[in-house]
Image (cartoon, rainbow, N blue to C red):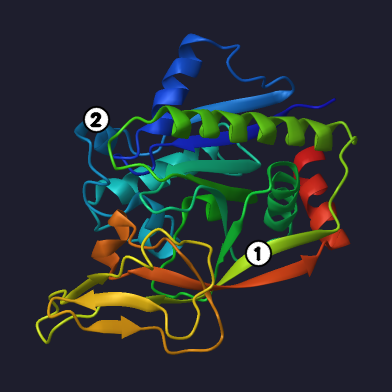
Amino acid sequence: MSVLNVLLVAGTHGNEINAPWLFNQWSNNSNLINTSHIEAFRVIGNPEAYVKGKRYLDRDLNRSFRTDLFTYSGSGDKEISRAKELVSIYGSVGRNPCQIAIDFHSTTSSMGNSLVIYGRRPADLALAALIQFRLGLPIYLHEGDSSQTGFLVESWPCGLVVEIGPVPQSVLDARVIEKTRLTLEITMDLLREVLSNSISYPNNLVVHRHLESLDYPRDNNGVLKAFLHKTCQGHDWKPLEYGTPIFLLSDGEIIRFEREDRPVPVFINEAAYAEKNIAMSLTKREVWNFQEDWKEELEKIIIS
């Protein structure tokens, strides 16, 4: 069996500390996770922000992996420099080239354990389908949002994000750490099964495809004038029915959902997304048949 190079990233956002804590424990105990036949390069995505307990220093690192930013020599942003550094070391033509990147995050919203994929790259879909089949995780397919681009895993031939929560920012939580470890361990097992040609692929993939993001109601000066209604808060992955209360104004007025398409909200009231003017993202649940080209592309990346 050949050896696969995999980039494992924690702390892409410096105030998401559970995955970095697990990585530090792993450094002290190499037997914590079985990585036989896998060369696992473990890195803290944004080490300076992590030390300071901040999400980022100059800009969101997980929006900084863009070629237009890489070629803009006048930028002094620390996150752009860090993104370029990671690609130069672990990218396809880097000093330690990796074929797959797994980026571990935590969320303050009630999404539980989930996966995020960007766009429809066949290898990403195949790997997500395998993890979903083994662990039953929901998948958020982020696409069609021109205001949100430059994600880390897009700079590698195959990659996805693991989101685990809910947990407040900068708080260690035993459940989050254990879920992170379990997802990491299962992912390593699945990659080994692909390497040894002993994997069984599922028949389908269930995704929640991004439709749009909703902002909080604001006044003419852009100041929030409402907050999440209690019947909406914490109800990630549950379809929004027509008439469901979603926002509550200070005067007691209720703003209700007035569509009949029953979209599924995710990242409801995510703390990190307040600065992005996102109260929640709406998705559509879809079941896709597993495609042969997904398998072929994943195996080409892993076995070649």
Relative horizontal placement of residue 12, taking residue 249 as reference (left or right): right
Q: Is residue 130 visible?
A: yes
**Tag 2: amino acid:** Val
Q: 259 or 146, which is in the foreground? A: 259
Q: 26 or 18, which is in the foreground? A: 18
Label 2 and label 1: CA atoms lie apart by: 35 Å
Relative horizontal placement of residue 146, taking residue 230 as reference (left or right): right
Horizontal and vertical percent position of residue 264: 53, 71
Q: Secondary structure at mark 2?
A: helix
Q: Secondary structure at mark 1?
A: strand
Give the number of callouts.
2
Quarter holding residue 192? top right
Relative horizontal placement of residue 98, taking residue 45 as reference (left or right): right
Residue at x 22%, y 51% (from the top left corner):
58
The disc placed on residue 51 is 2
| Other residues around mark 2 within 10 Å, as few (<14) / some (14–19) / many (≥20) | few
Q: 212 or 293, which is in the foreground? A: 212
Q: Nearer the viewer, mark 2 or mark 1?
A: 1
Horizontal and vertical percent position of residue 88: 48, 41
Residue denoted by label 1: 207
Residue positioned most to the left: 221
Horizontal and vertical percent position of residue 104: 49, 40
Residue at x 32%, y 65% (from the top left corner):
230
Q: 264 or 66, which is in the foreground? A: 264
| Other residues around mark 1 within 10 Å, as few (<14) / some (14–19) / many (≥20) | many
Residue at x 34%, y 30% (from the top left corner):
172
Please determine whether, in this image, residue 123 is positioned above or below residue 301.
below
Horizontal and vertical percent position of residue 95: 55, 32
Relative horizontal placement of residue 277, taking residue 189 as reference (left or right): left
**Tag 1: amino acid:** Val
User: Which tag, 2 or 1, sits closer to the chain's start?
Assistant: 2
